Image (tube, grey):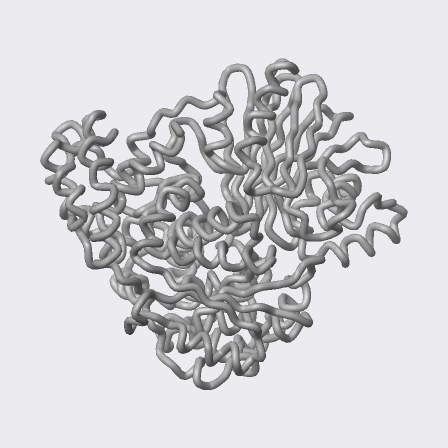
Amino acid sequence: MCGICGVIGQRENQAKTLVNAMLQSLVPRGPDGEGVFYAPGIALGSRRLSIIDIEHGEQPLYNEDRSLVLIANAEIYNYVEIRRALESQGHRFRTGSDCEVILHLYEEYGVDCIPRLRGMFAFALFDSRRGVVLLARDRLGEKPLYIYQDESALYFASELKALIRSGSVLLQIDYNALHEYFHYQYVPEPETIIKKVRNLPAGHALLAHIGDRSLTEWTYWSLEDVETVDANPAEVLATELCKIGQIIVRADTDIGVALSGGLDSTAVSALAAANTRSVTAFSIGYEGRPTVDERRFAERVAKTLGLEHHQAELTSDSIVADFDNMVTALDQPIADMASFGYYAIAKLARSHGIKVLLHGHGGDEFFWGYKWVRRALASLRNRDPSTIGRHDLYAYSEIVNMARRLLPGLYTPEFARWQLPYQERGSSQRKLGIRVTRLLADTYLRTNGVAQTERLSMSMGVEVRLPLLDYRFVELVIGLRVLRDDDDLFPKTWLRQATSSLVPDFVSKRNKRPFSTPIQRWHQHLFTAYHERVINGWLVSSGVVTRNGAARLASGACGVGNGTSLSLKALVFETWLHSLSR
């Protein structure tokens, strides 16, 4: 696991300079080592966070004759099985790294090696004989891979700020993306907040030809195109979870879990506890232990599962003190109050020597855990799924509706004319429930939940693993949904049934509690400390919001009440933009 970067097509001396600059920005993601590779027309760089084969897994990695070169930000969960098969075919391995299997798979199958990987990954593989570079990103988009192309070269990196700080990408805000950010609290992938920079879409691969600098990009996996599954949901999902539990804890370091005490985090904690000797749980609470503090549930779960348990308490002072570093670590502006908790969890885990942390993302998104999504689904019953886009899904989102209502009074007349772009990707022949699930996975799950957890944890040198986003598990859920509906059942019915042998009754039988934080108090302290950033910030000087609009935003009270206010979106954006000039 690490941070990667590269330049394809640039002059060698210039490419070296750019890669070195990007590597300096990626040090927090990979504090354990650095590696580079240079050849005519290509420069690759890697910063390593050592998880598997700590002593010998340095990157770049090479095949037997060194004709293939690999840098990878990856955790390949099925590497043991792949390696065993490849060794039986005569392949010789130099290290015990999980990522080395990618090289030998490529030798056997070419670009068709990608679908054989089970895990999270973003990698670049240079084939010197063919003069091509293969870039690929995992199916659910757990690992980022930012791409920028100009007339001279293709640039890529694990972080947006690495591209910007290299000097290869100008810091120019994309106004379409900014408009979407003010609605959604993030910029939906694959677009980014910076002009002409994008993420390689999840489930996609790209082949770059060094000679003529041509690019070929394709989709190798789509959530809507999985095979139909005709089986008992509880039984097949439970069986697959057991398999996931066995492979997702593979590491040469200790394992930690983020534990809230809810169904998802408890299931993940139980999976880890059943498959490895020592698991440490980490929880976050709030000063004064208000009713939204869930530590009492986490404490009971940890005791029941026999887990070592550590806690941290977020205070208003700590929120203010950590704000700048947290926003910088996010890499793109994401205005979600949950970020404070994810950041604190990662910091707490690292302080106890934990480098691998399991989270429960995916349970709500794939098993109808959100009320607003179920309301949207009910309203779309008579619609053709092929006509439904993310605007339809978010029609019942309080955050988006609040933005639609209040933004016209804050924008300048010039900016008020901007409209949300209508861009959807993927097939549409499947059922309504499947299409809605894909839209949710492509937006809120990937660009909000997964992105902030991955970025904030990696900034602490902590790798996040998400068992409920294992692609085979996801394929089962969607495949089952082809033949039967589960959205009319009690929320998370299939997941509750599948984890009944893992999760204590006092968790599985408790109704879902919406995530919440001490919003009002945190807003007050944040805007007392940082309101000037909004009053005199880029949004005003660039003509996005009016002077009066900025004053309203800077009060900290514009749209407060649902967890993400317009005020917070403005403050996060201004803080993020300022961080790039530090």
> Which residue lies at the image location 42% right of the left edge and 54% below the top edge?
449
> Which residue lies at the image location 22% right of the left edge and 57% below the top edge?
398
The quadrant in which residue 188 appears is top left
Q: In the figure, 343 relative to 550: above or below?
A: below
| Residue 257 drawn at (x, y percent) | 54, 65
Name, please, the residue furthest toward the bottom.
505
Q: Is residue 388 visible?
A: no
- Side of 124 relative to 540 (left or right): right
Q: Quadrant of the C terminus?
A: top left
The one nearer the camera, 180 or 581, is 581
Q: Is residue 294 visible?
A: yes
> Which residue lies at the image location 49% right of the left edge and 28% below the top edge?
163
The one nearer the camera, 66 or 34, is 34
Q: In the figure, 379 relative to 460: above or below?
A: below
Q: In the figure, 545 relative to 2: above or below?
A: above
| Residue 337 drawn at (x, y percent) | 32, 55
> Which residue lies at the image location 57% right of the left edge and 68% below the top edge?
280
| Residue 365 drawn at (x, y percent) | 41, 62
- Side of 457 relative to 293 (left or right): right
- Marks counted in the figure total 0
| Residue 510 drawn at (x, y percent) | 38, 81
The quadrant in which residue 73 appears is top right
